[in-house]
Image: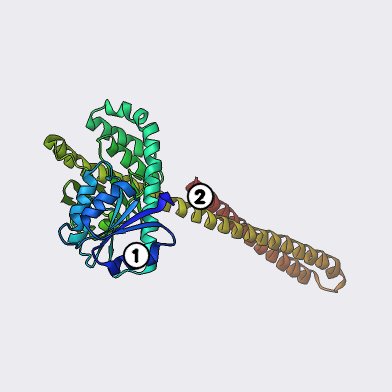
Amino acid sequence: MVQNRILAVDDEPYNLEIIEEILEDDYQLHCVNSGPECLKIAEEFKPRVILLDVSMPNMDGYEVCRKLKENPATSEIVVMFVSARGTVEERIAGYDVGAEDYIVKPFGNKELQSKLSSLFKVIENREILEQQVEDATSAAFNAMSLSSEMGTIVQYIENIGTIDEPKELASALSQCLKSFGLKTCSAFLVDKEVSHFSSEGICSPMVIELFELLKNKGRLYEFSPRILVNYPTISLLILNMPLDDPEKLGRIRDHICFIVSVTEQQLNAILTARVLKYQKMQLKRAFALVKSRFEELVCVLNLSHEMNEAIFRELQEEFENRIPYMGLDEDQELYIFKKVDTTIQKSVAREDLLTDVKSAFFEIEDDLSHILD
């Protein structure tokens, strides 16, 4: 249960009672009714998540959150604001002071439980990633740190040309920007569905909400120390722009649009390749069907040819056997034999036409085979 500690902060006892009723069976819950008491208890109780009311007397939720994040002992605690209002400005203000999520009163049991479940997944993933980063990041980026910024970008462009999966492309983008010391979140639009990726593991619910709220705010949207870059299929949020280094800040602002643009081109190339692959598969199926029909028609033509030969052979033999006994004069016999010969010649000519048809079928089949190769 230590892993599921929650601290609830609200100056209204009724609100705390509601939270307690929803959470007491699943979490180790502690409740306080003021900002100063929250700051005091947080270090002792060590909650994983703080449910923090925004509107409180003396010290509001924004100030409490800011102080929590400034204190090394409490800076890693995940904060979810609880407020009766939820405008874009208020959400951004909450995000600016370090909150990870926001829930608007009145909320339901399932809504609060769902948001907390998501937050605990973020926490768990972050801790796993931090351990992985501690073990592997140093070796992975030593070589890249020796390169210039432009060298890193060129290397990134060369490397993504071999990537054929959107998830791998998002990871490569994150790793490239990590080499500049940047923490990022990104949103990729693939097949009308948006997938979110983070250099810190999983995007928090508030970040996902910001992508949706700010997608129509222009190519660049800045709210220090963050900047959001919007392209049609990729949006990139940088969380820690280097405000203390104006030269580096300027270079990064120049780089990021180019990097995202190139990344989007590769994403479009990946999606186009998928479409072409699917179309080729469909064309192969169509070719197999056409080939099957051609083979059936050739069989029919061959059977027709064989039947014609048998019929005329039988007819010719019958005439040869019967005409001498029919009492015909010589002119009549010659007329009948000539008529039979003419009919047989017309049939042979028609068989030649069928042979041409079969030849055309085989040529078409050969042409389709070359197209698919």
Where does residue 361 sit, x and y in percent of width and height?
A: 57, 55
Nearer mark to the viewer, of 2 and 1? 1
**Left or right: 227, with 322 as reference point:** left
In the rendered image, which residue does mark 1 sit on?
19
Picture quadrant of residue 302: bottom right
Residue found at the very far bottom of the displayed protein: 327
In the rendered image, which residue does mark 2 sit on?
367
Residue 316, placed above or below residue 359: below
Residue 31, placed above or below residue 126: below
Residue 190 visible in the current orientation = no
Q: Label 1's element? A: helix
Picture quadrant of residue 331: bottom right
Q: As rendered, which of 307 and 372 lies closer to the eye?
A: 372
- Residue located 34% across and 29% down the image: 138
Q: CA distance from mark 2 to mark 1?
A: 72 Å
How many numbered callouts?
A: 2
Q: Label 2's element? A: helix
Q: As rendered, which of 56 and 261 lies closer to the eye?
A: 56
